[in-house]
Image (tube, helix red, strand yellow):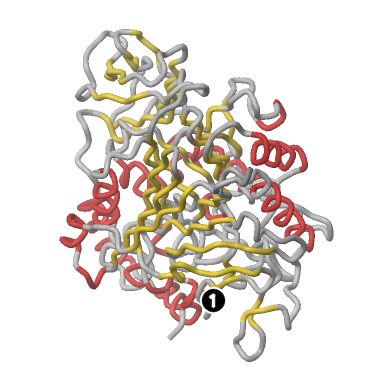
Amino acid sequence: MNRREFLQLGLQASVAVAAGACRGQEAALPAADGSIAHLLPTADHRRLVLKASFLEPHDQPPVLSVNGLRVPGRRSDSRGLFFAFDADGLAADTEHELVLETSAGRGLGEAWRLRTLPAPDARPARFRLLAYTCAGGPDPGLDPILRRCLIPIRARRRLLRRALAFAPDAVIANGDHVYWDLRSGARLVTGGSPLARFRGGVFDRALPVLGTPNEDVVRGAFGPQLAGLYGTLFRGTPSFFLQDDHDYTENDNANQQLQTFPPDDFMLDVARATQRLYYPELIADASLPAGLQREDQLAESFGTLRYGRLFEGLLFDCRRFLDASESGHFVPPEAEAWLTARLRGSDAAHVAAVPSTPVMWSAGKWAEWYPDVLDQQGVLGTRRQKRYWSAGWLAQHDRLLVAAAANPGRRPLFIQGDLHAIALGEIRATRSASLAHNPALALLTGPVSSHDLFYPSSARDQPAAVSSMLEASEFVAPIEENGFSLLDFDASGVRISLFRWKPDDGEAAIDDLEPFHVQDFPVPVVAG
C-alpha cells in the first residue's frame, strides 16, 4: 500500500480514535518551565529577539531582563498568551543572563544564559552549526494512520535534545515546522481530517487569522507542533527558522484544480501569524535590501546568520514569492541580486546558501528547481514534461550556483532540507556552466519527524535522486531516516557530521547517537 492509498483511510478516523490520539499527544508535551510554555530566541552580535508563550494570559506585558536591562514584551495575540521581546544594543560575543518576570518583578521560570554572536569583523576560531528540517506534525498518539506518517513528539524532543548535547553555537531549522495541509498533500491525515477538527478546529479561510476564531485554531493545531515540541529546549541557543511549503498550510501541488503557490492571502496570513506567535523572524543586517525587511529591521523570508568573518549563511524562502510564469523565479529579482552579491562578495571565510528548496536532488515534485518527473516506466528524468513547471526556476538555480562558486578561495556550500532525507554530495556542472574549478557541496540535513508515508519513496514512489540536469556525485546517497547534521567551521575548512535514527532502533538509542558519516572539506588552495 503506497501513501496515496493509505491516506484515503484518514477519512475513516473516528472520534474515539481521535480522543485516544489526543490523550497520547498530551502525554508527549514537555513540562513547562514555571508558567512558560515555550521559548525560541534568535540573535546576532548586538540584538536578541525572543518569542515566548505562557500557560496563563498576562494582562500586563511580561518583562525580559537581560543582565538587569528590562525589556517589556510586545503582545502577539488576542488573549495575552504570546509575547515577543526585542533587546538591542547588547555586547557582542558575550554570555548574557536572561530571566522573564511579570511587570511587577515576579520571576517566571528560572534564569538562563545565551551568548550573542561575534561582531561581523571579529575573527572567531571556530563555529559549530546544528541544522535539520521537517520537525513539524501533530503527535500521532494512538492514531494508526498518523503513526505511519510521523514519529511521536517525545522522540522528536529526544533527537533535538541529543543534538543540543553537542553544544552548537547556532541552529538552522529549515522549513516544515507544521503539517496541517488544508487543500493538498497530506490533508486527509492533517488539516482536513476528522482528527484534525477534533484536535484543532476548522479554519475559516475567509477570515483573518489573528483576532478571529482562526486564532484558536492556530493554537490548537500548531501549538503542540511548536510549543509542545520545543518547550524551553532552545532557550539558550540562537535559532534561525526558515519557512517552507507546509508552513503555509499546503504542499507544493499544481494541477487543473489547484495550484498552491504563490500563496494566496490566507496562506500568507497563516504563515505570518505562526511566525509572529511561535518563532523569531530573521534579524536583518545592513546588506539586506529595504524591500526585503520590515521597518523594525526584522525579515520574514530572507536573512543572514553571520558569525564574525568565519561564516555567513544566507537563508531564503523559495515559496512566498514563487512565480510560475515561463520566465519565473523562486526568489524575486531584488532577493537574487542580494544573494549573488553576498555569495560573490562576502568577506567571510565560509559562505553557505540556505534555500528552503534544495539543489542537487529531485523527487519529481512540481515546485523544484528541476524539470525531472517520473515517466511511465517509473524513471525520474525529463522524458515526460513536468506540467506547470517554469524554466525560469532552473535558470535562477544556475545563476545562484555560478555565483556561489565564483570565489576560488572558498568552497560553495548549500545547507538544505525539505526532502525528508539525509544526503551529502557535490555538483560539478549545471546545465549551463561548469563548476569543475570549485564544485558546490550540497547537504540534506535530515528530517526530525518523518515516518514511512512521509518519505518521498512512499509519497511519490520516488526517493530523492540527483537531477538529470546536473553533473554531480554523492558522498552519501539519500537516506530516508530521521536525523540532523553538525557543521564545524574553522580557518582550514568545514567538517560535516551526519546523524541518523529510525524507530526500529528504539528511542533509547537516541541518547547515545553518534555520527554515522564524518567528512572534512578543506578550504580550496588558490594557485599563485
Above/below status of 64 relative to 366: above
Q: Residue at x 73, y 58 (%)?
A: 393
Q: Nearer the viewer, residue 272 or 183?
A: 272
Q: Secondary structure at mark 1?
A: loop
Left or right: where does residue 310 sit relative to residue 40?
A: right
Residues 338 and 24: in front is: 338
Q: Is residue 427 left or right of residue 450?
A: right
Please tell me whether residue 422 is drawn above or below residue 7 in the rendered image: above
User: Where's the C terminus, which quadrant?
Assistant: top right
The percent coordinates of residue 223 (x first, y second) are 37, 44
Rendered residue at 46%/38% (across/down): 240
Residue 311 image position (x, y, % from top left)? 49, 36
Q: Is residue 198 visible?
A: no
User: Where 183 falls versus 349 (above or below)?
Assistant: below
Q: Residue at x 27, y 16 (%)?
A: 101
Rendering coords of residue 365 (x, y %):
62, 69
> Can see residue 91?
yes
Question: In the depicted view, which residue is nearer to us: 236 or 33?
Answer: 236
> Badge 1 is on which residue?
460
